[in-house]
Every structure is written in C-alpha cells, then in structure tokens.
Amino acid sequence: MRQAAFAYDAERPVLKDVSFEVQAGDFVGVVGPNGSGKSTLLDLIDGVLAPGSGAVLVNGRPTREYRRRDIAREVALVPQHFALEFDLTVRDVVEMGAYCRGAECSPAAAASAALGKLGIAELAERRFPELSGGEKQMAVLAQALVQNAGVLLLDEPASSLDVSHQLALFELLKQLNADGLTVICVLHDLNLALTYFDRLLVLAEGGVAAWGPAEEALSPEVLEAVYGVRALVHHHAGRTFLTFSPRRSSQPRERGRVHLVCGGGTGSSLMRELTDRGYEVSAGVLNALDSDEVTGRELGLSMAVEAPFSPVGDDAHAENLRLMADADLVVLSDVPLGHGNVRNLEAVRAALARGAQVWVLEGLLDGDHTGAAVSLRDTAARFFADEQAVLAELSRLPRPPAV
Amino acid sequence: MTDVERPARVSRAAREGWSGLALAAGISLVCLIVSLAFGPVSLSPAQLWHDLLAGPGSHTATAIIFWQIRAPRVVLAFLVGAALAVAGVILQDLFLNPLTDPYVTGVSSGAALGATIAIVAGLAGGLWLTGLALVGGLGTLLLVWTAARRRGRIDVYVLLLAGVSASYLLSAIITVLMIRANDDLGAILYWLLGSFSGRTWTDVETALFAVPFMIVPLFFTKEMNILLQGEKRALELGVDVERTKRVLVVTAAILTAIAVSVAGIIAFVGLIIPHLVRLMVGPNHRRVLPFSLLMGAALMGIADLVSRTLLAPTEIPVGVVTTFIGAPVFIYLLRRGRRT
C-alpha cells in the first residue's frame, strides 16, 4: 500500500498535510494525543472519508476511485466502538465480513476459519449483544479478517482488554503480520507501541510529528513536544520502556538544589521524586553503572562519578565537593558504607563544617561497615526515619534552607 | 446456556428457514379463508368453494356477494397489510430505531395530504390520487430524514420530533382543506379514518402495483442485515450505503403511499408486525421480510373482518380496529424497550 500526501479539511482541519508511505507487510503503530486525528486517519485510508485536498492512495490508486465493495476487499477496519443492539449470533456478525467478496467465498466457511484462527470458535453460536467487551472486540476482528483484505486497520483495539488479552491480541497481530498482512494500528499505550511495532507514526495537531523506527519515533524530544511531558527511556532485561514525569524539562527549577549521597539503588526513588517536584538534583560519588548512577543519567542529573567497582578517587571527590558546595541541602540515603565509598562521608563532614544543612536517613547507620557514620550523631545533621519523612519536611519548607 | 442445548437451537434456527415460513403462509391462508367466509352474510366452506369455481360471471346471490363485495376488499386488505408491514421493516432499519413506522415518520400524513388534495381537486379517480399520495409521502420522508441527519447519522430524537411535527402540520393543512371543501368533507373524513368498505377490483388493481415493491427489499437482505451495525460500519464492510438507502427509502414511501391511497390511514400495522416477527424469528432479514409480509397481510385481513362483523351491520373503520390492537402493544413494547 502506498500513501501520498493528503489534507483533510472540514470546518476545522483535523489533519493538515500528512504524508507517509506504508509498504506491504509493514507493522505500523499510530500514536498521538487525544484529538490528534488518529481515527480520522484510519477513516481516510479506508476511504470512508475523502481527503479535502491531496490524495490517499491504496495500492497506488486514490481511495475515491474505488467502489465501496472494492476498497473493502483491500482494506479492513476494526473500529474502536461497535454497537449492535439486535439479537444476531456471533456467526451472523462475522459472516457479514464476506459481503465484499460476493460469490467468491462461502461466508459460513470463511467465518469458521476466522473464528478458528482467533481461537474463539466456541463463541460462534452466542448472541452478539451478550458478549463481554473483549469478546466483542475479537468477534469484530474476525469479521474484519473475513474480508480477506491485505491491509488491516485497528482503532485502539487494546482499550477494552485486560493486560493478558492485550498481549494475546498483539501477539496475534504479529502472527497475522508474519503471514503477510499489513497492519496499521492506532493505540494509546506508548509502551505497547514501543514493544510491538516496527514503525511508528506520531500524529500531533493534525500533522506528522515523527515517522520511523519505533525507538526513534518515540524519542524523549518528540514526546515532550507532542505530549508536553517529560519522558525517560529505560532499558531493562532487553526491553525498552518509557516512564513519564508531569513536568517539562524546560521549566526552570525554582525550588532549589539538593545533593544526594547514595548508591546501590538507595537514592533512585528520591532522585525521581525530587526531580518531579521541581528540585535540581545532583548526586555523588557514584560508581558508573551503579543503579543510582543509571537512574541519574536517565534523569539527566549532574553527578560525580567514579569508575565501576573502584574506590572514590581524588578527581571524583573534588567534583563531589564542588556539587555539594552548590547545593542548598545534602541528603544521605541509607547506602551501605564500605571502604570504597567511605570518602563520601568525609565530603559530608566538610559540608557540615561549612555550616551546610545535612539530612540523614536513619538506615545509614545499619548498613555502615566502617563504623564512621555514627559520629554524625554528634553534628548538626538531622536524622529522618525514611524518605517519606524527608519529602514531608521538604514540602513543609517554602525553600530548602540556604547554605 | 449448556453445550447440550446449543445444537438443538441451531437446528431449530435452520428449520425455521422453511418450515416456519410454511407455517406463516398456512396461518395467512387460514386467515384469508376465514376473512372470505365471515361477514354480515356468512358463507360455508362448501359455498365458498362453489362460488370460487363458478367464477365472477355467476349470478347467484352468494356469488355476487363473494365476487363483487367480499373478495376485492379482503384481497385489498391483505395487500395493504403486507405493504405496510414491509414498509415498517424498512423504515425501522434505516432509522435504526424499532419504534419507527410509516405513521410516526409522517409518511402516512404526507400521503394523506396528497390524497386529500386529489379529492378536493376532483381527481379522486384513477392514478391521480395514488400519484399525489406518493409525492406527499416521499416528500415528507425526505424532509424528516434531512432534518434528523447530523453528520451522516440519524438523530433519533430529532427524527421523532420532526416526524410528529410534520404529522401535525400536514393534518392542519388537511383540516383547512376539509373546511374549504364542504362537498367532499364526508369523502375525505371517511377516507382518513382508514377503511376497506366498498372497495372494488379497481382498487385492487392499484394495490397490485405494490407487489413488485414488496419484492425489491428481498434483494437487499444482506445489506439490511449489515446496516443493523450502523451506516459507518456498513461502509467499512463495503456496502454502498447511500444507494441502498435511496432504494429502500423510495420503496418504503411507495408502499406506504399506495397503501394510503387505496385504504386511507391505517396505523400501527407497520410498527407492530416487524416487532412481533423479530421476536419470533430474530433480526435476520432473510426471515424478517417474508414473515412480516405474510403476518401483515393476515393481521390486516382479520382486522378488516372484525371491523365489518363486530357491530354489524354498522362498520367500524379498520384504522380504529388496528389502533385498538396496536396502541396497547406499542406501549408494551416501549416499556420492554426501556428495560433492555
């Protein structure tokens, strides 16, 4: 299927100047904010709507030149909402998909084949209005498969499915795609889009914001521009996934700077929480590839970093002191202390000596293998039971205490 | 539902295809015979058979009653009943609303206005009345259809309000015409009430024009089934929706107009018959259409029989009889519809 530039103009344009081309056998996801014209795009490809200007081509031929029956043999659509009040059986409904094929196939045989392929043969004689939302979705998918079209369009097929049925559906679509079906699927869940689709089309404000391989199309820059949220790309166990923060990264940090002394994952949630709340966060000294270091890198924090599994060296220590000097507040997580990172305690004492505010999680003392931390009890450092107490105290203060 | 029950239901559904249809045809035939036999002068089955074989040229008293009075009105009642029922099926589908009928959508009133104009203008004979009823019915349907259409979808509330408003407006115009036309007042009033009294073979000939239009929808059963999912889905599945709708709307309007032009306004038949048939055989049009045709004919035959025998020798207009039967059923269906 080829698709040229088109624009759709009603009283208010839903899609303006959208151009992209899908090759036969592609597996394409379409994402975009609410109202970005995703469903309209599907209706245009299916020829239900005609472009106001430009052209939509299916197999190189403009959709408006097709008769309805002929385009239904090329493009099948699974709508987001499907209403049928009348008391037809699932088999009756699925057989309707054969309408466009005329006498070339037996509707009963095609329906049985489609129901079997989707593993819902047992629904055949049930009454359609009595089905659950997910079952209806599968029945309508079967109806679309009976059309035997080369292109399958789906409009948010996952929205009424629980997680196991979502995964089953996308695996099924993958399999149909492997058998040669071109799939174009509108969906909301960006992580599902990232996991399953080869290529993604990102629509925003009636235009194409990105179009290409999934991970490129959903870069944090695109997501920030399109959705206005801060997106973080994580790699875990061979999968790529996204998490989101409400704040835009371009927003100035008004709330002050916090330096975290952490490691081994003890500081990750504070890093995220403080960043989301608008603090400028720094950390150190962390070993490269330490899970806190990975999180800090994803969040784009300033950090003093030492080589993996190495004790804190002079350069990293100096950087740590510099970061601490810029901070309004230093927080020590309950990181285990050993000879490798005990030098961070030295940096904290230097800060205390300067009169800086230092907050310590009680847990630090439990994981201290050097015996050095207990001496903080005799300083101006304040102790907190857990992270929640730290965050509660911070939100009580208008700004972190100045140095 | 258990697995044991399921195959039984399937085979029953399969049997309903032909044996059910044969049953409906049998019921209609019985109704036809009963309608022909009973009346102010009742005929025994033997007399009925004898008169039928004697042919229209026979001059015995019962043969004259049979051929000149009873047969034309009974045949006419059956044709009108079938036409209204088929029109009802079509309109309920197109509006995707089971409470639609030729009466609610204003089509009957439009046809009535056309016919009234024909009577007032002295054109009551022949095809003028039918033609004007047709134009009135079709025009009203298009008007209501356009008013209720919002971005390719029919708004049911607007539809019902527009249909009822149109009915009132047209009735008002008819009333004005009646006041202005002293001489024809009786003719118009009698005709508006709906009756088969005094109808002749000429009227039957007019009604026979409806037969091909009762057959047209049978070629659109697949499209009508698919349209139950809404117009957009029908488009997606490859149905030429606009063409199908045009054909069906015109068919329904012609059927209604022909029915109204020969028998006046007979309410509720087009509403109830499709409903009852769906309850009996399900929503598949391959069954709904022929069943509605047969049951519409049978019901109208019986309604006409009641109209001429209940208070004999006085006749109750058949439109009054169908309203007596139809209104309670309509209210029952409304309540039932709200529950589901």
Image: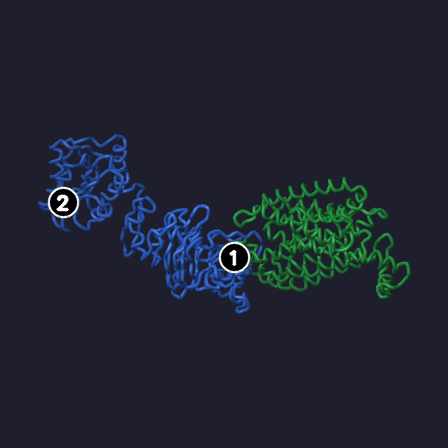
Chain colours: A blue, B green
Q: Nearer the viewer, residue A193 or A112?
A: A193
Determine whether, in the image, residue A300 is placed left or right of residue A229: left
From this view, report whether residue A349 is shown above or below residue A6.
Answer: above
Image coordinates for residue B66, horizontal then vertical, percent: 85, 59
| Residue extending farthest bottom | A104
Residue B31 in the image: state x and y as whole percent: 77, 57
Quadrant containing the N terminus of chain A in the rendered view: bottom left
Residue A371 visible in the current orientation = no
Residue corresponding to mark 1 = B235
Q: Hey, what amino acid is under mark 1? A: Leu
Q: Is residue B197 left or right of residue B172?
A: right
Seen from this angle, which residue lies furthest right? B60
The chain carrying label 2 is A
Q: Say what secondary structure mark 2 lies in.
A: loop
Confirm or deny contact between disc 1 and disc 2 (CB under 8 A). no
In this orientation, which residue lies closer to the viewer: B224 or A298? B224
* Front: mark 1 or 2: 1
Residue A54, position as x, y percentages in the image? 41, 56
Query: Where, by quadrant of the figure, is residue B21 drawn?
Result: bottom right
Q: Quadrant of the C terminus of chain A?
A: top left
Q: Is residue A258 above or below residue A103?
A: above
**Residue A304 location, quadrant:** top left
Residue B186 on image: x %, y %: 80, 44
Q: Tag on residue B170? A: none
Callouts 1 and 2 on one subunit: no
Please name the residue shown 85% across and 63% down the image. B56
Mark carried by residue A341: 2
- Mark 2 crowdedness (10 Å alpha carbons): few <14, some 14-19, many ≥20: many
Taking depth in this image into account, of A346 and B22 the one nearest to the observer is B22
User: Dot 1, how many residues are within 10 Å of its Cα: few (below 14), some (14-19), or many (20+)?
Assistant: many
